[in-house]
Image (cartoon, rainbow, N blue to C red):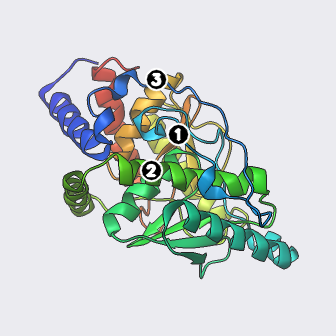
Amino acid sequence: MARTSDTIADHELLEARLKTLLPEEYQDSYEDVQPVSMGSAGLRYGQDGRVAWNEIWGSFCDLAMAGGPPHRGTLLESATKVEIDLHPGRYKQVVYELCRGVEMVTGLAAEPSFISGWIHVDCPSTNMAGWLARAINMENVSAHVDGMVLHLPAGPRFRLEKEIKNVVTSIAKTCHYWLGHTSVAQHRAIADLFRVMEFESPLVQAPFSTRNTRTAAFEKSRGEVAEKIHSQTRLQANGREYHGWLGVDCLKARPAIWMMRVMVASNVLCRREGNLIYVPVNPSTDRNGDRVAELLARAYRVASAQRVF
């Protein structure tokens, strides 16, 4: 696709927004970041026999937002109500450990959410909560933002060394970059950007609820979004099915990383699994999927003009 004045303007706008969102060390080098993992840190235990979450990490992999490897290869989802009701005691234990771990690594207050299957974390500002939600979803851990509250997933089947650690690691990693690698001036710039994006097009994120079995209405909405995206970009819906998400095949990792970041710079939560990007399907905030399809089509046009594909 040839570059036009419109695609050039869109590219410059999206690049500027992405640079605003990224920690300063990445702003001029994110195209060079490779999705290579440093490996997983092992658990450490204190004298009380419990995990010493605040002693595990000395450094972190590059942010998935900057093109680094997502913390998980597939999405960590919250539990269904059926799962929670079958194992209420174990669920309570998991929620307690998640809240304890989050508080130890971030200093933020965490407690059970009013919606089963989640914990909620109190952030000192809406811009911090919004940035963390975007960054954590890109690490393939479910996150939902509501004002200054960040919701993270929980479930009775979460294991200490796996899913619990995934949640704690994802917020430890993203808070590390937010608090240690972004300045107060950048926090203000991000807050300004969020206000501009919200005015243009309110944030689209996956539905926030206790995850249930898929309904006919949701499947219909999901199919309509997939059809609209395909008609405007020729990209095919593909990949694992998740509640509230649609996978779109970008064929290779490089365009998938590029598209993921541009969608987030367009105020749509997005994440990547290999060559696939996943965009939210949420009829309550994007009734017919028109907004997601339109913004993804714009990203595709810009990517094609930049020869990303």
Residue 275, placed above or below residue 59 = above
**As drawn, which residue projects farthest toward the front?**
47
Disc 2: which residue: 176
Q: CA distance from mark 3 to mark 1?
A: 22 Å
Q: Is residue 47 left or right of residue 6?
A: right
- Mark 2, residues whose alpha carbon is within 10 Å: few (<14), some, or many (≥20)? some
Disc 1: which residue: 60
Disc 3: which residue: 254
Residue 245, placed above or below residue 13 = below
Quadrant, the C terminus? top left
Q: Is residue 9 visible?
A: yes
Residue 4, placed above or below residue 248 = above
SS at mark 2? helix
Q: Is residue 225 left or right of residue 159?
A: left
User: Hey, what amino acid is under mark 3?
Assistant: Arg
- Whether tag 1 and tag 2 are in contact, CB under 8 A, the answer is yes
Q: Position of residue 225 (x, y in %)?
A: 49, 49
SS at mark 1? loop
Q: CA distance from mark 3 to mark 2?
A: 25 Å
Question: Which of these two is toward me, 306 or 151?
Answer: 151
Question: Which of these two is toward me, 167 or 145?
Answer: 167
